Image (cartoon, rainbow, N blue to C red):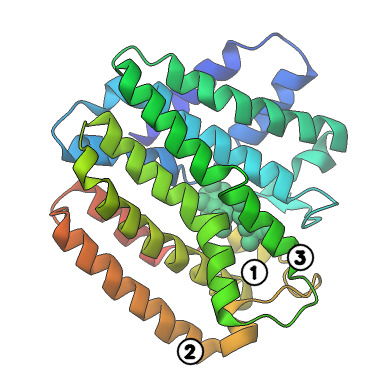
Amino acid sequence: MIYQIEQALKQYIESLEKSRLKDAVSYALLAGGKRLRPLLMLQVIEHYGLDPSLYIDSAIALEMLHTYSLVHDDLPSMDDDTLRRGKPTLHIAYDEGLAILVGDGLLTDSFLQISKQPVLSDKQKTEMIKILSLKTGNKGMVYGQVLDIESEQKQIDIQLLDQMYEYKTANLLQASLMLGAVASNQFEALPLWEKLGYHLGIYFQIQDDILEHTSTPEILGKSKSDDIREKPTYISIVGYQNALNILNYHEQQINIFMQQLEIETSEIHETILQIKKRKA
Ligand code: IPE
Ligand code: IPE
Ligand code: MG
Ligand code: MG
């Protein structure tokens, strides 16, 4: 499935006009991310017995939107990072103006990808675009990013940190699972996928805090800027051991929702196991 995702991303890049913009989009998209978000969407579709290969072009919308969020997240006015996916960040390799515009273009084109997928009905497309907008716009991921920036050099409590992580990270993972459910016409299952995505997202972001604390930029493939920017993290607020305990709590919740969704034998379970073991 990863191979098909990579191919669809390349096809999207090939459709762009030969330009510095195209080169920069290619640089950002083909730098080798884990592709978790499109993978999750496609595995939900597979779980419901449909052919995931018919939905790849809409699934890469999630990777495009995610990549936009990373390119903007790394900008000097945000986290000011120089390494991403093992390479210099886009504004370092190119320039800041182009990095902003690459993000703008990827975000906008992600909705085009969904609108163009022949196998989806108009109702499904509308619902997918609605979920993706709600989960990533000013009521979603962008709000989380604002909470993140505003929390720098501040003492915040764990409730606010959880809220920040829900918006900035869990929301897009929720959308990924939910888009898979909509594509499969499983509208009544949406609340369960949303809850699974919530716990998976918080789990993922606590893991990020732990990895940032215990790993190296070489292994992570990205800069470690939490300390320099004095960002509150799970470790700075509750300490390493409590962070592990809370991680464990979310793992149990993930298991509960996996049971309820009956996905223990699906490929999606494998991806969740991979996330649990991840080193980057
Ligand atoms: C990184 O996401 C940003 C966070 C939400 C922590 P990933 O760890 O999925 O990044 P890539 O796509 O594999 O580079
Ligand atoms: C990234 O969060 C979340 C989004 C891009 C929405 P972070 O800033 O904590 O993640 P990394 O460490 O840069 O990947
Ligand atoms: Mg950030
Ligand atoms: Mg960052």
Residue 86: where, in percent of width, then height?
Answer: 65, 50
Tell me the residue at 79%/54% (across/down).
78
Q: Tell me how far mark 2 sits from mark 1, CA to CA.
A: 22 Å
Would you say residue 203 is visible in this rendering?
yes
Examine the image and state in which quarter residue 151 appears: bottom right
Q: Residues within 10 Å of mark 2 (few under 14, many from 20)?
A: few
Q: Is residue 61 above or below residue 165?
A: above
In front: label 1 or label 3: 3
Q: Residues within 10 Å of mark 1 (few under 14, many from 20)?
A: some
- Hey, what amino acid is under mark 2? Asn
Sequence-first disc among 2 and 1: 1
Which residue is the site of mark 2? Answer: 242
Question: In front here: 45 or 192?
Answer: 192
CB under 8 Å between callouts 2 and 1?
Answer: no
Residue 21: where, in percent of width, then height?
Answer: 75, 21
Which residue is the site of mark 3? Answer: 150
In front: label 2 or label 1: 2
Helix, strand or loop status at disc 1: loop
Say which mark, if any, is on residue 216. Answer: 1
Q: Tell me how far mark 1 sits from mark 3, CA to CA.
A: 26 Å
Residue 229: where, in percent of width, then height?
Answer: 80, 70
In front: label 2 or label 3: 3
Give the position of the N terminus as an image quadrant: top left
Tell me the residue at 59%/18% (across/down).
13
